[in-house]
Amino acid sequence: MDETRKRAQLRLGLWVFIALIILTVVELWIAFAVPRPLLYLVVINLADAWLIMEYFMHLSRMWRAEE
Amino acid sequence: MAFAPILRGLVWGALGFLLGGGGAVLVRLLLGLPAFQPEPLITIGYFPGLLGWLLGVGAWDVWAREWFGLPVRREAVYDWRRYFRFTTDHKVIGVQYLVTFVVLFLLAGFFAMLMRIELMAPGPTIMSAGLYNHIMSMHGIIMIAVAVAAIIGGLGNFAVPLLIGAEDMAFPRINALSYWLIPPVAVLLVSTFFAGGFDSGWTAYPPLSEVNAPGQVLFNLAVITFGFSSILGALNFLATILRLRAPGMTWRRLPIFVWSIFAASFISLTATQFLAAGLLMILLDREAGMTFFNAARGGAPLLYQHIFWFYSHPAVYIMILPAFGLALEILPHFSRKPLYAYPWLVAGFFGIVFLSFIVWAHHLFTSGMPDYLHGPFMATTELISIPTGLVFLSALGTIWMGRLRLKTPMLFALGFLFNFLIGGVTGIFNADVPTDLHLQDTYFVVGHFHFTIMGGMIFALFAGIYYWFPKITGRMYNETLGKLHFWWMFLTFNTTFIPMFWLGLFGMNRRIFDYPPALGSVNRFISISAFLLGSSFVVFVSNMVLSWARGPQAAANPWQARTLEWQVPSPPPVHNFPAPPQVVGHPYDYGFTNSVHALVGVSGGSGEQGVDTDG
Amino acid sequence: MQTVRVHVPYDHTHTRRIGLWLFFISEGFLFLALISSRYYLFGLSRPEELNQALGLLITTILLLSSLTAYRAETSILHGDQGMFLRNTLATILLGSLFLVGVALEWAEAFRFFPPHTRFGTIFFTLTGMHGFHVLSGVVLLVFLYFHGRRGRFGVTNTWPVEGVIKYWHFVDVVWVFIYPTLYLVSS
């Protein structure tokens, strides 16, 4: 039971990491393919930051009872 | 030995400094740079030195040992020696802050007296132009530090946990750390006298601050350290107020002083980093040859002003919000009436916090900023008068038809209202672009600023000191001397600073040791008033010292006030309350029958609400 | 008067979390000041000499280190000491690798945009300030590793792990904003 939960959590971390890498590559592509990319970059950055803060830093646990 | 921790801190600090500085010499030798340049060595040696000082003074014993798996060492000291130690009791830290900053206040006041001697007559009188600029800069930065930290660090530390019914702050060791960062600041600032001084004022504008004497480096390091201390303090207050309120102490029952500290801490926590960043950039420009503000290499001096005022305008609300809170805390107790329009008042505080972040460029109206920015910043600046107006209406509504008890704290709170009104109204002329173009950098600005900060924040500070003196010391101050101090200070304060508005309108520049001969008689009048103002603090100091030593024993609640700190003995016991108090009503409901704020010491048991002993 | 005894369970870990997040907010403003200086001094232009491959590589390394840090925290919460130690060590190595990458960047930067140029000023300050945070994070992780080897953390004592690893993720979040600011923004 505990073991399956652990596995699920670890898998979630992997998916978040993959999403982050994809976003980074997209960012790089936009920077060279699109003129005036600032706005897109900011949006992607906010998505990146949200992914890390929500899934890695457990931000929403601040407002929720423990686990 | 009583001073052993401080001695150890000095030794470890010196070792750290030598280690860092020596390392820097080695690296520079390896890179083939001139090895013994004083400025980079001081800059690089300072941070290990600071770390050594903090560890030596006590952070090693009560804190860092556990990072290495060692048991922490705490000694139980309950006599006067605890004031010279890394003590974690918020009441002790409050007193440490308060005494330190009153001493610094008197020192900076002494510098002001020297300036007024110089300005007695046009032309050079007792000092050179350069020394005048250094003295002026010292007066400025030390007074700014007093304004930022005296109420928050001193009275806030002492009173906030008591007012919310907590045992201590949320992070007692961080609290001690933020106090023990202050002595290096004072030492650095005073030692600028041996490093050629700094003549760039407390604002440290480049390009001057990038080319002047090495004293500037000490100034920058001091202010970065001070900023670090106030960030840690703010973090602690926010966590404490969020987490350690006694059962029943809902947000609508929070004493107004606590609200004001809460609001000011938001600004302190965030904006202070901009000051640190700006000063760090100056250091990088000076020591690492970078080019943030160096126009010759393509930098932008105006960038500094944007970064600096993004902190320093909100900073005046770090100074004045707790002063509002303190005055409004005192008014209901001495008017015997509920605090008028409490929710609107809190909304006013947060309106100020929000607006304070979007007004900074009103300091740059004459600096060469693009013209299209003038209008918006004028508008946001003037919007601030709306939340400030809410605060004023609440104060007036509270004393309206009240049964005023004109004790010393109440007199200072009323003096605060009077002075701050003048300070606030004259601010409008500085916020309006057309008038500001004329008034910028004149004594009008000096008058405005001293009416808000000295007439406002310092008067509130004294109100708070007299108000909580019996609680802090367990003894009563002398009421006659207190009233004498108030009237003496209030009258001479006004005669000193009101003529400065006139001087400013007639074009007397600030920050310069000289002025046109036609302004001589007014300056002489101001100087004489200023000396009288300075002498009023003799009354204050003697009252404090004599009363602390041999004043009559104070009762637990000499003001018949309802808030929690008065429901425990004076001075409060080490853990404040015998048990977490039960808050059942509003703190300021004077005149309501059967209304109770809190039940103290009746709920029995302990340990419901713990305090961190290790974090 | 009737006295009511209300039991208030006090969760100190939650207070510490609040304190740590407040610290992050504060630090965020420091980086905000530095990042906004980039746009003030250099506008939206992008020097062609930037080594895009290296930039992408160190970004990937730092993101990967966040994954190992996450795995370390998750495993200690489930009491898996071995996996915790392995992942902490991996995070330390990846963090150090990132610092090596930054050092390579600096070596190139000294040639193309030395510190006394406008872009050099921004580049060295931002990477330097962030690198200092990475370095302090690595030091904290080393402490964590050695305490972990003595079995000091378990399901009950996880705050030091949580705190250090949150700090590590925060450093990652900061880099997420610094990376495009230095490498990608263009007009």
Image (cartoon, coloured by chain):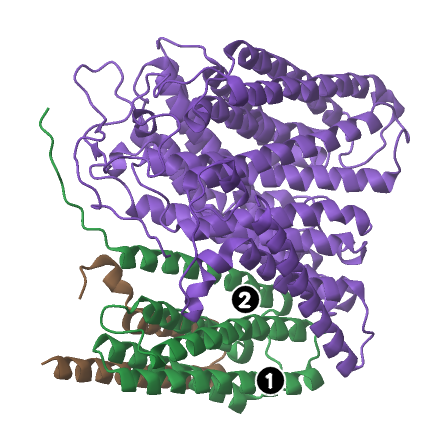
Which residue: 34% across, 73% down? A52
Question: Relative to C2, does residue C186 appear above or below in the rendering?
Answer: below
> Residue B37: horizontal and vertical position, in percent?
81, 67
Which residue: 46% across, 34% down? B155
> Residue B304: horizontal and vertical position, in percent?
65, 55
Query: What is chain C's hue in the picture?
Result: green
Which residue: 48% across, 31% down? B323
Whether residue B310 is visible to the viewer of this picture, yes or no, is no
Describe the element under mark 1 as helix, strand or loop.
Answer: helix
Mark 1 or mark 2: whose residue is earlier in sequence? 2
Which residue: 25% across, 74% down? C154
Residue assigned mark 1: C103
> Residue C151: horizontal and vertical position, in percent?
30, 78
Label ID, residue B342: none
Query: What is chain B's hue in the picture?
Result: purple
Is B251 placed left or right of B413 in the picture? Answer: left
Task: Report in which chain the residue with disc 1 lies.
Answer: C
Q: Tell me, by letter, which chain the rendering colours brown.
A: A
The quarter of the image holding the C terminus of chain B is bottom left
